Amino acid sequence: MLAQDLFPPTEPFAEGRIDLDGHHTMYWEVSGNPEGRPVVFLHGGPGAGAGPDHRRFFDPRHYKIVVFDQRGAGRSTPLGSLENNTTQDLIADMERLRNHLGIMRWHVFGGSWGSTLALAYAQAHPERTSALILRGIFLGGKAEIDWFLYGMGRIYPEHWRNFVAAIPPSERKDIMAAYEKRLTDPNPKVHLPAARAWSVYEGSCSTLLPSPQTVAAFGEERHALGLARIEAHYFKHGVFLEEGALIKGITRIRNIPATIIQGRYDIVCPITTADALHQAWPEADYMVIPDAGHSAMEPGIRRALVAATERYKAIE
């Protein structure tokens, strides 16, 4: 399904689970070169989880590739749990994993929500961050969250109609509250249809050209539940960051080598956010992919991400 501009599939040489707090258990894996340059992959969502193809952005002969599922996502348990699930918790989890693996410094690679978490982590721990590769920039601002809930319908009205069809017309003035009520309902007959509607909406708007495979993946039950429930939780709380905090924090990471990669026609995370980050951080490389939307698997974005990991082989 994927073009050959990614590295060949590779399997983990180590994997495990960390009990984080007596409630959450985090899945992690390491592949590639055991003695290689460490790089950590941060998945999107929040709540989307990681998969085997995410290892393929990195040369397994050079990189020690660390992949983990954030709290409540993917193979971490319990799936979709909102308890003790904040940006600050995820940053602490990354430090716990880094220490567990005996890594001093690592490259940090993240797209969409992963770019948010990568920036937040690097600003909290610049001494542990050797480089940043960021894609599909999301900074968690109110305007960005409102765009997701209401604005994307200006470009994809048919997908937005399907999104809001899951809630009664009387509740559509506050889509966030309406979805939160359903996503946190203990009855699967209530929360699963809502989760699928939320997740399929995002998947349907994520590629420049229609991608039935992407939509099908977003509609899968476990993926949809983790993504929708945790994403709504983070959106409700402004991703647990002060408005504008990640732009203000650029001074702490200004000298860290960084590449920002953005699809020109990204509808989920519009280019205005990446442009604002670039204006605040001109030292970072900035690449606009002219024929791409949001997904990391679109050809132009895929190639640019691999090219960045290749360039960063020289960074210690």
Image (cartoon, rainbow, N blue to C red):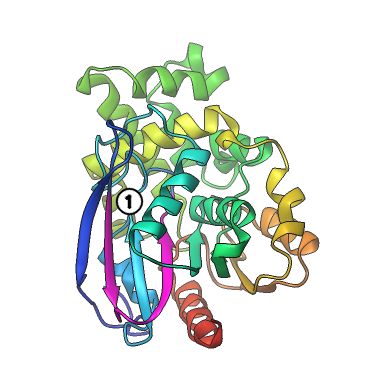
The quarter in which the C terminus is drawn is: bottom right
Figure quadrant of the N terminus: bottom left
Disc 1 element: loop
Write down the residue under mark 1: 69
**Between 37 and 232, the one nearer to me in the picture:** 37
Determine the main secondary structure of the stretch shown in magenta: strand
The magenta-colored residue range is 27-44
Among the 4 quarters of the image, the one containing residue 198: top left
Image side of residue 50 versus residue 237, left or right: left
Q: Is residue 204 above or below residue 281?
A: above
Judge left or right: residue 255 versus residue 15. right
Q: How many numbered discs, if any?
A: 1
Residue 289 appears in which quarter of the rendering? bottom right
Could you say where residue 81 lies in the image, as x and y percent from the top left?
32, 31
Q: Is residue 67 part of the magenta span, yes or no?
A: no
Residue 290, position in %: x, y? 61, 73
**Residue 189: image x %, image y %?**
21, 21
Spot the residue most to the top. 170
Q: Residue at image x 39%, y 50%? A: 203
Residue found at x 35% / y 71%: 65
The answer to whether 211 appears left or right of 155 in the picture is left
Of 50 and 299, the residue lying toward us: 50
